[in-house]
Image: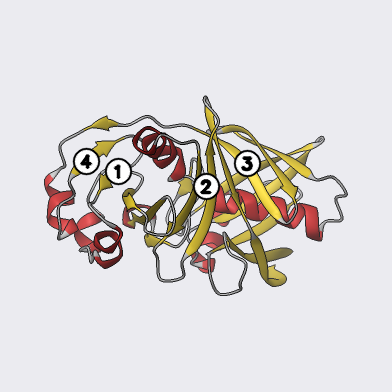
Amino acid sequence: MKLPIYQLDVFTEMQFYGNPAAVVPLETWLPEETMQKIASENSLYETAFFIKNGSAYDIRWFTPQKESDLCGHATLAAAYVILNHFGDLKDHVQFNNSSSGPIEVWQEDGMYSMHFPKYETTRCEMPYELIQGLGKLPKAAYKSRDYLLVYDDEDSVRDLDPDLEELQYVQTSGIIITAKGEDCDYVLRYFAPSMGLNEDQAGGSPQCTLVPYWAEKLGKSEFVVKQLSKRGGTIYCADLGDKIQISGKIMTYLEGFINI
């Protein structure tokens, strides 16, 4: 069986920056084991699979190790493929997923946007594995879907060198570290070794936790965000009250086929 595959760089205006995601369009769902093997072979943080369902698309996301319940950059990448490579003349795409519910992505002036849920945080104590793995303790720790760890400044986030082997034992989807930005509103890095990737390059789903946190701290509702990973990425976010908006630019890197 020959399947189309696309690889895109998300949250960037330049190739080789931002967050790479693979997208595999399907006519019907493959066995879950097969989709997991494809994602493992791709060795990217997320591979998105979708099938057309009426006027919308059903979508699923896989890391190299397991299926995800939500992935922002791979959702934007899937919408980009539909709107730019499938000849869909509309300017928006409706996705459905059994875990996250409906997600709409729209394109305007080269920017791709979507609405995601807000995750409220609660102050928490850090487990032993998290303390051991960080190397430098934050000034505050919170828990939502992920751990949210707040540092004093941008340099502390950029320079952090965690023990990723230790962090893989932390029971969480991911670990967000953040601080107020110097030339943007806030910065972040995102580690998810338990999900099959040491460090995410530029992500949408961490903003579900970060936007409500920084909206309260900064007293504003629109944000320019920089992810301080090796590749880097720029994400535009807005607090819309009951949800958040995540926007970014996308570049196509690869178009091809896989044989299974």
Q: Mark 3 points at which residue?
A: 114
Q: What residue type is labelled 4?
A: Ala
Q: Which amino acid type corresponds to the residue marked 3 in the rendered image?
A: Met
Counting residues from the start of the chain, the first of labels 1 and 2 encountered is 2
Q: Are marks 4 and 2 in contact (CB under 8 Å)?
A: no
**In the image: residue 30, left or right of residue 116:** right
Tell which circle, 4 or 2, labels the residue nearer the N-terminal end.
Answer: 2
Residue 1 visible, this orientation: no
Please indicate whether residue 259 sits to the left or right of residue 216 in the image.
Answer: right
The answer to the question of whether label 3 and label 4 lie on touching residues, with beta carbons closer than 8 A, is no
Residue that appears at 27% across and 64% down: 155
Give residue 10's quadrant in the image. bottom right
Q: Is mark 3 on a helix, strand or loop?
A: strand
Pointer 4: what residue? 141
Real-space Cα separation, disc 3 to disc 1, in angstroms: 22 Å
Of labels 3 and 1, earlier in sequence is: 3
